[in-house]
Amino acid sequence: MSKPIPDEVILGLLKAQPAHGYELLESFKSRSQLGYSWRMSTSQIYAVLKRLEREGAIMGREVNVQNAPSRIEYKITEQGKQQLESWLFDTQPSASIHRIRVLFLSRIFIANLHNIPTKRIVEAQIRSCQSQRDRFTHQKQSYHSEIELLTLDFIVTQLDAAIIWLKNNEFQLSKIT
């Protein structure tokens, strides 16, 4: 499984307001924002920004700043807005526990940032987890070794916990700073 990429998270941040790389990086470092979900370096942020700009999802323009070097400020394009919308309301999000922690919580953060109701996002995640749980539960019926059964049982238990967590939370963040 490939490593999650922050493209749509960056698009969501830029939809809220144009920003330069260091401003975006602060959102990924702040514990009150995305700091617990993502670990991003300056070079990673700028690499993603360059790629998103090449792909037409964002547009950069040089901004002169008094008593500082000029900066490139990025803003989201219509294409980027469509990409963001598609990601936010993905009907088949990954049921991987790691991706729930990183991508699902990022969707929740961005949805709250834009005052978008989270119900559809949460329901899609629950369906995805239930589908995965059902698949692994079925696999447990024809296991080949004890270690396979233990592994499948562990995965099913994690998915059960994720489903309970998803159902028991409102996902309405009262304060995003």
Image: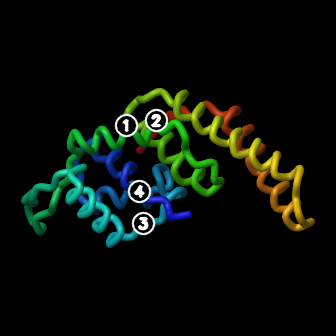
User: Residue at 53% across / 56% down in the picture?
Assistant: 37
| Residue position marked by numbered label 4 in the rendering | 6
- The type of residue carrying mark 1 is Glu
Label 1 vs 3, first from the N-terminus: 3
Q: Do the residues labelled 1 and 4 touch (CB within 8 Å)?
A: no
Given residues 7 and 145, the one toward you in this image is 145
Secondary structure under tag 1 reads: helix
Measure the alpha-carbon separation of dots 2 and 3.
24 Å
Label 4 vs 2, first from the N-terminus: 4
Q: What label sits on residue 40 in the rendered view?
A: 3
Label 4 vs 3, first from the N-terminus: 4
Residue 39 picture location, percent across and down: 48, 65
Given residues 68 and 130, the one toward you in this image is 130
Residue 153 picture location, percent across and down: 85, 54
Residue 79 picture location, percent across and down: 24, 42
Q: Residue 127 is drawn in which quadrant?
A: top right
| Residue position marked by numbered label 2 in the rendering | 89
**Is label 4 or label 2 in front?**
2
Label 1 vs 4, first from the N-terminus: 4
Measure the alpha-carbon separation of dots 1 and 4.
14 Å
| Residue position marked by numbered label 1 in the rendering | 85
**Is label 1 or label 3 in front?**
1
Given residues 31 and 121, the one toward you in this image is 121
In this rendering, the answer to whether 47 lies above or below 169 is: below
- The type of residue carrying mark 4 is Pro
Secondary structure under tag 3 reads: loop
Label 2 vs 3, first from the N-terminus: 3
**Is label 1 or label 4 in front?**
1
Q: What label sits on residue 64 in the rendered view?
A: none
